[in-house]
Image (cartoon, grey):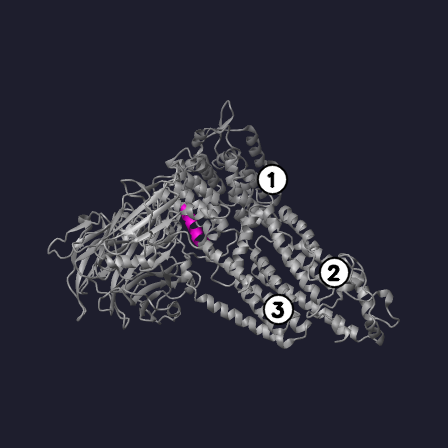
Amino acid sequence: MNASEQSGANCASDPVDTQTLPRRRRAWRLGSVAPWPELVLLAFFSLYLVRRVNTQLVFWNQNDLFLWNRRFVSGFCVSAGQPCEWLGKLLLQTCHYDWCGAVAIAAVACMALLAMRAISLRIAPIGAVRVAWAASALMLVVLHSQYDYDLACTVSLSLALMATWIYLSASNRNRWIRWVAFVVAAVVLYYLAGAALWTFVACCVIAEGMAARQRGFALCLLVSAGGIVVGINIGLSFLNQSFWHLDLPEKSYLITSAWDAWLPLVVFAWYPACVFAMVAFSRRAQSLENRSSESEKNAIESPAPRKPVPTFFSDDASDWGDSEDPEDRSDSPRRTTRFLQSAAPVAKWSVLAVAAAGMLWMSPSRVVQKILEVDLAANDHRWQTVLDAARGVPRALNADYTNHDVNQALYHLGRLPEEMFQYPQQRLICDHGFGARGRMFSRKAFDVLLELGRVNEAEIIAHNDFEKHPSAIFLLRIAETKIIKGQYDAARMYLRALRDDACYGNRADIYLHRADKNRSLLDLDLAQIRARMITADDAVQTQQKQPDGSWAISTEGTLLSLLKQDPRNRMAFEYMMAHHLLNRDPAAAVKEFPRLKTFAYPRTPLSYEQAALLHAGNQRQKPQMTSFGVMINGCLIRQETVSQFMKLYEIDNKFDGFAKPAAQVAIQRLVGNSYFAYFFKAESQDHE
Amino acid sequence: MNSRRRASAIIVLAVLLAAAPHDDAHALASSPETADSVTRQPGIRPDFSNTVIPPNIAPLNFAVQEPGTAYRVRLRSEKGTGIDIRCNSPSVTIPPRQWRTLLEQNRGGRLSIEIEARREDGTWRRFAPIESAIARENIDSHLVYRLLGAVFVNWNHIGIYQRDLETYDERPILCNTSFENGCVNCHAFANGNPELFSLQVRPSSMKPFASGMLVVREDSAARLSTQSKALPTPPTYTTWHPSGRWAAVSLTRSEQFMHSAGAETREVYDRYSDLALIDTMTGEISSPSVIADPGKIETFPAWSADGRCLYFCTAPIRKEAPSLPPFAGSETVRYDLMRIPFDPETLAWGKLETVLTADRAGGSISEPRPSPDGRFLVFCRSDHGAFQVLQSDCDLYIMDLTQKDELPFRPMAAANSPRTDSWHCWSRNSRWLVFSSKRDSGLFARPYISYIDREGHESKPFVVPQKDPLFYDSYLKTYNVPELVEGPVRVSQQELSRAIHAAASPESVENHAADAVAPN
């Protein structure tokens, strides 16, 4: 074997005479890879995940159910790839705990990179390894900044690369041993990681077929992999799957992107592509070198001493792996070396620039982040956070994703009638079909209906969602509805199931502990909801016939029924008034003014004042003047609001109506985001 | 043997010994430890106390509901050596082989379970023994049922499963994942024969296919296209004629609505329903007016043991007020129990006869099931309607068919519970009744077994045992329509799936999408 073949990318033997290397390099290359770059990356990656991405939002977006019991685990044992799915879910649970999750994710990703680097060092020059490593690290960081990226992909990738590393460690053994090692690794890997097997197979095939030039053996590996896949699938199909008594929850994220289905393909195909590129590059460099003059042969016959190991981020062009010291170059032209020397810095900086641009572009979507923040804050009853985060959501998405949480937050903060129209408003929750759109919407609809006191309707949404996507948050919600309804035996069933959940189990434990001690399961929140719960079935009364002849539940009907059964239901009142205001029906809102006394508002809320004046204006009614001020249907209207209303007439006269954009601007300037602006804006849209 | 191998052997042996289970069952030469006697019986879960058990049932594993640091359990009967179990946890696992031997040797005898619990101070408490009877008659070896979640509107995973009652083995017959999460329901066996049965399938919104009836004979399944312009809906409740050729089906249009208040949110009512007779060999359908009165709702057909009489439930069709939703007034509908003679040779129907009115029964009657020996008939009674599984007041009643005039009936007080008891089925020897009961949680039905003696007296029911005694505590699926069969169902899921996806006949009308009700 000549020196060129020796120094080529040959995974069958280490091309470097390690005895002549400095000690630091020996430690670097002697069968082990010092993980310093990965450790540095782990620190920065963890920080990035916590501060920029927020792993709790990743958890919130993806989590469904994760039970610490044999039954749940065994459900992941009957199909290829499911064990890694389980590990991915386990990793996701750590995200609930912020730093813990960030470090865990970063560690798994760094393991993949460490394995990748160890493999690459066997088959490519150090410079190419660095580029590939940096690009792969960047890719993983970008992927993990997506809230719908499945963590099981990284786990599977790590296992595949580890298996590849182990396989290539046996590359100096004879073929039979290598084949056995391959088969054993492939069997284990396919069962554990499923499709990631093909990453391992591709790397091994490229290493054997291209780097070691053993194409026949590479083909044999490929065929063996196919046989392993078929064999394992057949074997697993014989297992009695029904014995496991559990249907694994299908993946159901709160928010998914259009291309999330492609991400696993990107992840699993990326590294084989890198290997292929590195090996191809090495072979190309090798063949160029082989074509050079006789001086190269002389140089190889009496090898020049090795240079000291450069630092990892050195700009020295010789880092690309050229074993010759540039000062020792012979007089004959070395086109390869000159090309590399001139191209390297440019290529390097170009790659870095593209990478940085890509990272900025692919960084976690702020809109998705805000939507998830709003949803999580609403779930946790952090109402001010809901309002703060909602301001970051574009108006076009507000109706679906944040409107309902915002209204609920305003209600809880006591500001719904005053500030409702400072936020974009589209429609009011109470749409019973709202839950059909997915888990996020189910949660919103459930929470509002439950708090209103429409417990059975909330129960329907909870059961429907749980049936479609078993999740811990709905296990808990179902249990709470049963507690509110006094169905403690049924509640216990759900709490016992929830008790095994990794993150929510402690809440179930608290309830069950109370149940065991014969103490009430009703805490303050649930007791308040029970007090508001309707007790008379109004299913018939709340149905409304639609134009097409079908029947649907009427929002107004349900709210009125709530007030009829409990006139002190403040949430029902405010939501009913909101419903009238959103429907631009100030007359209906004014009609309910006598109820204001029940709730002891310090003064008539702003939106109601404005509605009252609009109603008076529509009816051409002269408001009642008293010593306290203007009164409409028993409610005092502030002078400031009256003055604003009078100025609206001026705008009307000036612009000949409110439809013109100039009129809208003037209204906005006068009254800001208030009911007046909403009312006339909607009217102008009608006229258009 | 060199020292290394010897050391390895010792290590392996030590590991095996350490891993040996602590809970073991063996005939103990017990040391005469004293135990304080307690006069009451211990609490056990599930409650297998004071009942009648089949001699071929799987071991009734249970959990002791008394505090203790260790437990001793002794199972004794007149014959045989008995079984002794010691365990540190409250969960008691009975060894299957010894259990089977004990029961086989003591058919018609009694089984006594003595339980002792060790206190924290090391002393023992002995509770009063739990006594149960061992019947002489076996129960049918397999139980087929539908498993689904607590479905309100949407369903996900539904399947028909079979459980070997003599072991804990449960296998799927048909999971709906094999046909795009459609609905499968209304499985019905001909005389408990696992090789002749039918089931109904409906598509989900994921991928429509024609609804219809599958008929399984031995290992093969075929779609029986029963939809034609004459039939408004696919068949639902099915009963096989003892001859195995005809099936009487109900063509029911059910709708669901939700109560906005009250314990049970769901309610299902029949808008219309008729009966039809299907020749399963030819697919020919007849629906004469005696069993398909346009002014009445006919449902829940059930053949008598000799096939010469068809029982069913009927109620007048309710007039719907146009200004009110269709379900308004459904709580007033009550079903009577009827029967009509049938001549299998000429296919002629006789004169309709009222067996029991809702007024006399004190509620709406549903799901009549005559016993195979023709002596008794068990039915459900609830306040109103025919969807008894959602009525918490639904109870089982038994009627003596051997009397001439007014057939006496009574509630099965020993079997009933304050919650829903329904979907009952007889064993072939007419000694066992399996039914679904929601007594534990009010939401999830479990299969219960009760012994019926020759005089029609029922025993206290017990739940179908599981290997893990606490299995039902957190199992969030409900057992629907348990049916006893005399052996395992052998048709493969692949065959059933193929039949489902087989093209329907040209006479089929449009598919019925997932807006119809999934019975629960």
Q: Give the position of the N terminus of chain A as an image quadrant.
A: bottom right
Q: Distance of mark 2 from mark 3, alpha carbons?
A: 29 Å
In the rendered structure, which amino acid carries the disc numbered 3? Ala
Above or below: residue A181 compared with residue B266: below
Above or below: residue B419 compared with residue A608: below
Q: Distance of mark 1 from mark 3, alpha carbons?
A: 63 Å
Magenta span dominant secondary structure: helix
One can see residue A234 in this view: yes
Q: Name the side, left or right, on which B421 lies relative to A44.
A: left
In the rendered structure, which amino acid carries the disc numbered 1? Gln
Q: Which residue is mark 1?
A: A668
Parent chain of label 2: A
Parent chain of label 3: A
- Nearer to the camera, A228 or A52: A228
- Nearer to the camera, A460 or B133: B133
Element at badge 3? helix
Q: Distance of mark 1 from mark 2, alpha carbons?
A: 73 Å
Any magenta on residue B182? no
Let me know if marks 1 and 2 both belong to one chain. yes
In the rendered structure, which amino acid carries the disc numbered 2? Arg
Element at badge 1? helix
Above or below: residue B7 compared with residue B37: below
What range is drawn magenta here?
A459-470
Residue with the most extreme left position? B404
Q: Which residue is mark 3?
A: A202
Let me know if marks 2 and 3 both belong to one chain. yes
Q: Which residue is mark 2?
A: A26
